Image (cartoon, helix red, strand yellow):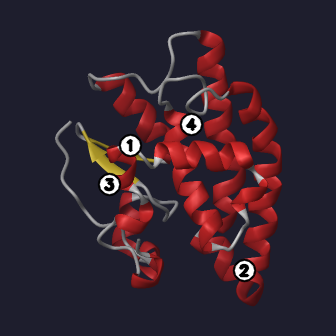
Amino acid sequence: MDTSEAPAPGGYALLTEPYKALNPMQQVPAVEIDGVTLSQSLAVIQYIDETRSGPRLLPADPKKRAQVRMISDMIASGIQPLQNLHVIQKIGAEKVQWSQYFINRGFQALEPILKQTAGKYCVGDEISMADICLVPQVFNAERFKVDVGQYPTIQRLNQTLLEIEAFKESHPSCQPDTPPDLRA
């Protein structure tokens, strides 16, 4: 897939009027693709999966596909949004404790599910949308000093995924707009 790199607007740049025109939620991602602007990670991933050739990110098997969607949604809708800029701004000085609480709460729910669904990856032995969601959330957990070792399945899956070149290259700590203190 041909792509062009555009650094994500960091921090308060998300709150500008030009970015609001692109993504009214003032969050990342916002992707212009095939003449349409899409926001929300799962919508972007599913659109790419449905319109581009290559390995599928949603399994053909309906049960596995539902598991991938469930895990992806748990991360993208149930854990990650509680560390978004808008939320953290409201929390203020307690942002680390807040983030630790909600990441741990989410991982406590996610760990037993992944114990049931995981093979080499989150759901079986094929990379899926769930894996794409897991890696940046583990990065976020580490950023907020969550002990990921409490979640051995999550930790194992993350380590396995980070051995894959595409996950290494796309890791949040390796992006050109990542603040120096969060770089790999």
Residue furthest out toward the top: 61
Residue 95: mark: 2
Name the residue beneath numbered marker 4.
130
Do residues under tags 2 and 3 come within 8 Å of each other at their CB atoms?
Answer: no
Cα distance between the residues tagged 2 and 4: 26 Å
Q: Are marks 1 and 2 in contact (CB under 8 Å)?
A: no
| Residue 146 as seen in the image, left or right of residue 60 | right
Q: Position of residue 139 (x, y in %)?
A: 55, 62
The nearer-to-camera label among 2 and 3 is 3
Which residue matches tag 1? Answer: 164
Residue 166 x, y percent position in the rendering = 33, 45
Under tag 2, what secondary structure?
Answer: helix
Tell me: residue 142, above or below residue 97. Answer: above
Of discs 2 and 4, which sits in the foreground? 4
The residue singled out by tag 3 in the image is 169
Measure the alpha-carbon separation of dots 4 and 3: 18 Å
- What type is the residue that disc 2 sits on? Lys
Q: Residue at x 68, y 73 (%)?
A: 145
Q: Quick one: label 4 or label 1, which is nearer the N terminus? A: 4
Residue type for callout 1: Ile
Question: For the residue carrying disc 1, how many other residues have a C-alpha within 10 Å: few (<14), some (14-19), or many (20+)?
Answer: few
Is 11 left, or right, of 149 in this rendering? left
Residue 33: x, y in percent?
26, 42
**Local SS, label 4:** helix
Q: Residue at x 67, y 72 (%)?
A: 87
Q: Is residue 3 above or below residue 92?
A: above
Given contact means CB atoms under 8 Å apart, are the residues at marks 4 and 1 in contact?
Answer: no
Q: How many C-alpha atoms fall within 10 Å of the one at disc 2: few (<14), some, or many (≥20)?
A: some
- Precedes in sequence: disc 1 or disc 2: 2
In this rendering, the label closer to the viewer, 1 or 2: 1
